[in-house]
Image: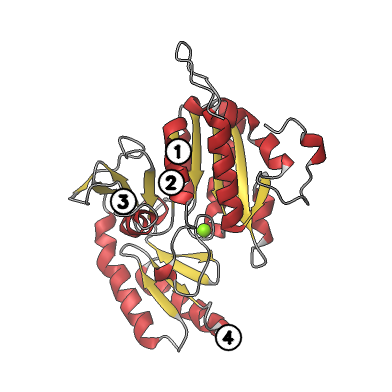
Amino acid sequence: MDGDGARLTNRVPSAYPAADVRAALSSLIGHPTSSAVVTDFDGTMSPIIEDPAAARPLAGIVPVLFRLADLFEKVAVVSGRPVQFLLDALGSDVGAGPWPPISSDGGPDLGVGLGPILLVGLYGLESYTDGQVIREPGIELWRSVIANAADRMATEAPAGVVVEPKGLTVAVHWRRAPDQRQWVTSAVAAQARDHGLTVHAGRCSLELRPPMDVDKGGVVRRLVEGCTDACYIGDDLGDLPAFGALRQLHTEQAVRTTGIAVVDDESDPVVAAAADVVVNGPAGVLELLAWMATEAAGVDDRPGHPRAHRR
Ligand SMILES: [Mg+2]
């Protein structure tokens, strides 16, 4: 620690997150071996760009996640992207990636043996463990329905609208064509009505998902089970259930929780309102995570196993 927090304010750019962010995370930093660090991907680890397929993590952020995974009880990336996309994207920041190739499917088993960084995709419909993608039971029935809806919209979409099939969900983006927002809204609503799908809002996008009770809130509740402290970092409307889950865990189970909103000029204000503190963009997240790793490396919260002071 710098030992002089009084001199730091939110307005002072520095190598450290703002004073309120550091204060909000002080308990989590002090108890790494019983704490969970959970983060979104798009707009949180990666800058938002026009072509969703090209999104990649900010350089250096994945190695920091690995440092955190060494220190904390759980480190997880929970995203609306498919697990395969997360493997490819996160692997791009660490060369070939530390994960074995995906081999087969199995049953749902969040949080067990997912490796050093837990990966959960499609808002909890998919997760990755021991080289396998595991999916919610019964979800495969929706794959062809989603594919049909995606094909139909891709065929009819006006120029600039990007249809992003994700296997078990499909997102439709109007970022390149802001004047086509109404077309996207109508097209997505029609497919939802025709196929019994549900509509979810995102940044310059709408997404169709199967009508299942799965969201990031349920994922966070399962991941954080048994932890004393937890934080969740996210930037979008799909992260609201995760922030809500943190509050519920705090109220009902006395887990010390911190919701961290990632904000920029485009952010919907409801995201910051649902969180406890804010950071500025993925660059702020990288700064925050690096600070957490440095601070937690100096903590020994394991009785009988003193850890060398590495700072
Ligand atoms: Mg996001």
> Viewed as shown, does residue 43 lie left or right of 104?
right
Q: Which residue is mark 3?
A: 97
Where residue 163 appears, as percent x and y from the top left, is 40, 76
Q: Residue at x 42, y 53 (%)?
A: 123
Q: Which residue is mark 4?
A: 179
* C-alpha span from label 3 to label 4: 39 Å
Identity, as a three-letter code, of the amino acid under mark 1: Arg
Residue 67 is tagged as 1
Q: Extreme left residue here?
A: 103
Q: Which residue is mark 2?
A: 63
Q: Which tag, 1 or 3, sits closer to the chain's start?
A: 1
Q: Residue at x 34, y 65 (%)?
A: 166
Q: Which tag, 1 or 4, sits closer to the chain's start?
A: 1
* C-alpha span from label 1 to label 4: 43 Å
Residue 244 visible at all = no
Q: Residues within 10 Å of mark 4 (few under 14, many from 20)?
A: few
Question: Secondary structure beneath disc 3?
Answer: loop
Q: Quadrant of residue 113?
A: top left
* C-alpha span from label 1 to label 2: 6 Å
Quadrant of the drawing holding the C terminus: top right
Q: Residues within 10 Å of mark 1 (few under 14, many from 20)?
A: many
* C-alpha span from label 1 to label 3: 15 Å
* C-alpha span from label 2 to label 4: 39 Å
Identity, as a three-letter code, of the amino acid under mark 4: Asp
Up-down relation of residue 308 to residue 29 (above or below): above
